[in-house]
Each structure stands twice: as structure tokens, then as C-alpha cells.
Image: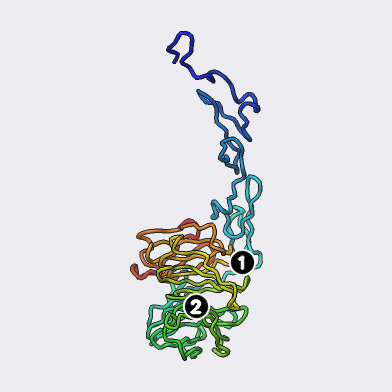
Amino acid sequence: VSDCKDGSDEPLHCNVDECAKVEINQCGHKCINTIIGYECACNTGYKLMPDKKACEDVNECIETPGVCSQDCFNTPGSYSCKCDDRYYVRESDNKSCKRIDKADPWIFFTNKYYVRKLSTDGMNYVLLQQGLRNVVALDFDVGEEELYFADVSAKVIYKAKINSTEKTEVIKHDSHGLEGLAVDWIGRKLYWLDRHTKHLDVAELDGTNRKTLKNSGINDPRAIVVHPGIGFLYFTDWHLQSYIGRIGMDGNNFSRILTFEQKVIWPNALTIDYFTDRIFWADAHLDYIAFADLDGQNKHEILRGEKVPHVFAITVFDDYIYWTDWNLKAILKANKFTG
């Protein structure tokens, strides 16, 4: 609205089409006229840079990691998805991955006194081991179809065939504070944490050739997982300066990839998605489940609050995470990207 007859109270750019000449607007992609000026916009797959004129590519693989079920490759203005063709085929949406085999997956779990397996649809429930005292961790050797589980009260790590009720003692000496354990199914090694000795130990899968990989910088260890493909172990430590650590499977190259400064307080649960090369963990104090790259970068939260009040253990399979919760006394699942 013009109040002064000579128009002196009006903006200088009224009724001027700045979008007519790129020399004026300097927009990298698009120019949009407004009442008192103009705005720059970008093509799909790009975003405005801080100068609000130039455009840069959006890396969908980092900013919206759920766009691909497995591998994601950023391209100018877009992205492409790939599935591990040894085990999966890409579906018609060009994003999702479908397992080739038709085998029904099982979840192995414990509630101190027994070990059971549960179908992922929750319909089938099978007892595997009973008469245990306080089992706090377990892992699976795919090659031999054997379970390894740690009984903290018995101070023993056992192994057992998944179709047998018999069990064998693997580690039974100097194991007073057993916590997490992990099976390297490629290198044929067993790794475990001990909160009493504050050690990270390793042995052959039969318990021989035992040695300590790390005996310093560990205070309240909890969970451990192995990535044979890159030769690293990942483990969690509570304490006042809690962290998620990474160490070579030979005991070298230790680093803290996520710390209390990144809001990691009680990292109770830990797992790896080997098809996306991401770590997933749960914090039982701040009540969230999150994932990040294997170096701790690009952290994304999946769930937070009353849905995850006290997660104890977690695993990932296909497009889902599965976890146990002490408060809810349940096994739950959710999409690994969206929750």
C-alpha cells in the first residue's frame, strides 16, 4: 500500500523482477519472486548453502540414512541403494532388501535361569537350557551352531549345541565378574569382559590360549561385539567417564569413539549391523536407542523415553532391531531406522 503520493515510503525493489537476471539474484538453481524481493531455491536433492544463494548436494545417506535398507551411495542430487547379493535381493522400490533364503530366524535370549529361543513373530518359544544361576550374556557361533553364554554367579562361560540340553565349560577360572561376551566366528576366538578384574580377555573357542587384551582404562565394562571384517572389537564402559570403545582384535589401536560428552552415560547394550556397517546401542540411564558409523560419527537416535525405559541387550536382523527391557520385562522390536 502506497501512503506517500511520490512512493518514497515504498521499498526500492517493489515491482522489480530480480529473478529476470541471474547477475542480480545470483541464485545457483532457482529464483522465486516475492512481494518485496526474491528468494533462492534449490532443485530436488540439493539444499541452500549459508549464503542463501548457492546450492550444495544433500547427502541422503548421512542425513536420512533410512532411505536404503543396506548400502547407500550418494550421487549428485540423488542416491542409489544396493543390497548384499550373497544373501539379499533388492525389491521393486529400489531401496529395500529381501533375504534370499526362506529360513525362519530365531532370537536366542536368557532371563538368568534359562536360555530359550523365540521366533521373530513371537509365535514359537523353545527351551534350550535350564537350571542356570545368573546368565547375563550370550552369543552364537554360526559355523558350529553353538551358543556361548556367561553365568556370572557360577563364574563360568559355557557352550552348548543349539539342539542339545548338554553344556560344556569353556572358561571357569579367574572369571569372577563376567559381563559381555562375543564370538569371532571367522577367527574362531572368544572375547569377554570382566568387571572384577576390569579386563578384556580372549581365548580360543575351547578356552585354551587365554590372554588379556586390555587391562587399563576399563572400569565398569558391560557389552561387547566383534566385527571380524575390519578387525575391531567394540565394547561399552559405564563409570563416571563412560564411553563406547573400539580396539583391534590384537589388542592394539584402542580409542573411545563415543563418550559421556556425546550423551553416553549407561551404554548397556551394543550390536553391529554388518550390512550397513553401523553400531547400535542403548543407554539405560538416558533411555534411548541410537546408531552411528563405526567411528562414532553421524549419530542418530531411533527411540527415546517410555518405550525404552531400561534396555539391557540389543541385536539387529534385516530391517529390525530386537531388544530386552528390564522394566517392561519384554522382548521388543522396531524398524532399525525409524523406530
Task: Name the residue furthest front.
Answer: 216
Give percent across and percent down for residue 326.
Answer: 36, 71
- Using the image, determine if residue 42 lies above or below residue 156: above
Mark count: 2
Task: Name the residue furthest top.
Answer: 5
The amino acid type of the residue labelled 2 equals: Ser
| Residue marked by disc 2 | 216
CA separation in Å, label 2 and label 1: 44 Å
- Using the image, determine if residue 196 lies above or below residue 307: below
Give percent across and percent down for residue 210.
Answer: 55, 88
Front one among 181 and 324: 181
User: Is residue 227 visible from the viewing direction of this image?
Assistant: no
Front one among 298 and 74: 298
Q: Earlier in the sequence, mark 2 or mark 1?
A: 1
Q: Quadrant of the N terminus?
A: top left
- Using the image, determine if residue 337 lies above or below residue 138: above
Q: Quadrant of the C terminus?
A: bottom left
| Residue marked by disc 1 | 100
Q: Secondary structure at mark 1?
A: loop
Give percent across and percent down for residue 160.
Answer: 50, 86
Here the colouring is rainbow
Q: Residue at x 48, y 69 (%)?
A: 270
Q: Are marks 2 and 1 in contact (CB under 8 Å)?
A: no
The amino acid type of the residue labelled 1 equals: Ile
Q: Residue at x 47, y 82 (%)?
A: 149
Q: Crowding at label 1, few (<14), some or many (≥20) Cα neighbours within 10 Å?
A: few
